Structure formats: structure tokens, C-alpha cells
Image: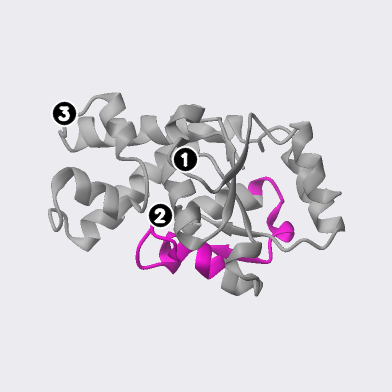
Amino acid sequence: MINDMEYHLTAWYNILNADLNAGLSREEVRSHMYGKNEELLDRIFGKGHFTQEEVFEISKEKETRYQEAFRPHLQLIAGLPDLLQKAGERHIKMAIGSAAIPFNIDFILDNLSIRHHFQAIVSADDVTVSKPHPETFLKAADLLEVAAPGCLVFEDAPKGVEAALNAGMRCVVLTTMHDKDEFRDYPNIVRFVDDYTDVSLRELFS
């Protein structure tokens, strides 16, 4: 929905190195950026290294820095407003299935006034295991009362596409973050697009 990963990356890079002395390169930090914040910290420092209170405070500080940096640039990916409108006109059910915490999801939905487009929201707080586990997408499908094979997922990360595959769902990949060759192992991809202005998306609403 938004192209903000570099802002997440910068926030994590500074937190992990300046605050927590992890000694990681920017690319090493990037490789850990999937799933819940707690899972990311576990991968880097080992499970149980931080108390739940410390995890909460680290996560809160990271998301606060991310939002402060990204707020002036906050906008939907090109073509998405039109797609959301057309999907709504055709009564297509839509959900958000995200590894983000509600604090960040609310930041996007409310500042861009798009909450009304979505009939369900599944955040990091709503699942036990994050992507690539299928729980996020399966829970979203259940809330929409739609069978998994009838769902189409829009993703920009390999772990998200893997989660869709594990859920038995087809996927459209936005190449805003990763190159096509990073998705070569996923047979559930129906197309690649640079953004939502891609003319090939029109057939979804024909």
C-alpha cells in the first residue's frame, strides 16, 4: 500500500547499532526485516535476550522514529486509490494482513483516510506466528468469509509471497522492494507490477 521500507530500515539500523550495539551492516539489518518486531530481535540477539517490557519499549521507539521520518512522505503507491475505489464499487471484499502493529496500521489508515475500504484487519497482535506462516492471511480470509483459493494477495516481499503460498492463495507482486528474481521459487505468483497503474490489473475488475 505504501513504499516505506527504507524508512523502516533506517529506524531499525539506528536502533540496533546506535542503541543496542548489534554491529550490523545495513544489508544485514534488511535481511532480518520480516515478521514481528519481537521475532526480529530474537533472530539477532537470541530468544529471551530482552524482557517483554524491553521488547515493548524498543518496538515503540523504533516505530516512533519510523513515523516521524516517513510522515512528510506518506502517500499510497501510485494507482492504489483508484483500485480501492473500483474494488469497492464492485463489492469486492478487502482485508489488510500485515506484520505491522496496530500503531503503524492506524498511522497509515487514518492519515490517508482509507480505513473504510477494508472489511477486516489482521495485525501482528492478532496472530501467534507471523509471515511466512500463513496465519495472517488465513485469519483475514476467515474474517471476510472467503475461502483461501478465492483470495488474491498483493505483496512486496518474498516472505509475504511465501505466506500466501502456504495459505493456498494467489499473489500479485509489487516490485517496489525486491527484484523479480528474488521471487523465482514461488509458483503462486500471477503477475509482477511496478505499481497499481499497471494496465494488466484492469482485468481484475472486468
Q: Residues within 10 Å of mark 2 (few under 14, many from 20)?
A: many
Identify which residue, 45 or 66, lies in the foreground.
45
Q: Is residue 112 magenta?
A: yes
Identify which residue, 92 or 52, lies in the foreground.
92
Looking at marks 3 and 1 on the same chain, the residue that comes earlier in the sequence is marked by 3
Q: Position of residue 136 (x, y in %)?
A: 47, 62
In 3D space, how far apart are the residues under numbered discs 3 and 1 (Cα atoms)?
Answer: 25 Å
Identify which residue, 182 or 65, lies in the foreground.
182
Looking at marks 2 and 3 on the same chain, the residue that comes earlier in the sequence is marked by 3
Disc 2 to disc 3: CB gap under 8 Å:
no
In 3D space, how far apart are the residues under numbered discs 2 and 1 (Cα atoms)?
Answer: 10 Å
Residue found at the far front of this picture? 187
Q: Position of residue 67 (x, y in %)?
A: 49, 40
Q: Residues within 10 Å of mark 1 (few under 14, many from 20)?
A: many
Q: Quadrant of residue 38?
A: bottom left
Disc 2 to disc 1: CB gap under 8 Å:
yes
Q: What secondary structure is marked by label 3? A: loop
Magenta residues, start to end: 111-140
In 3D space, how far apart are the residues under numbered discs 2 and 3 (Cα atoms)?
Answer: 26 Å
Q: Position of residue 117 (x, y in %)?
A: 73, 57
Q: What secondary structure is marked by label 2? A: loop
Residue bearing mark 3: 23
Q: Position of residue 32 (x, y in %)?
A: 30, 40
Residue bearing mark 2: 131
48 to 159, vertically: above or below: below
Residue bearing mark 1: 157
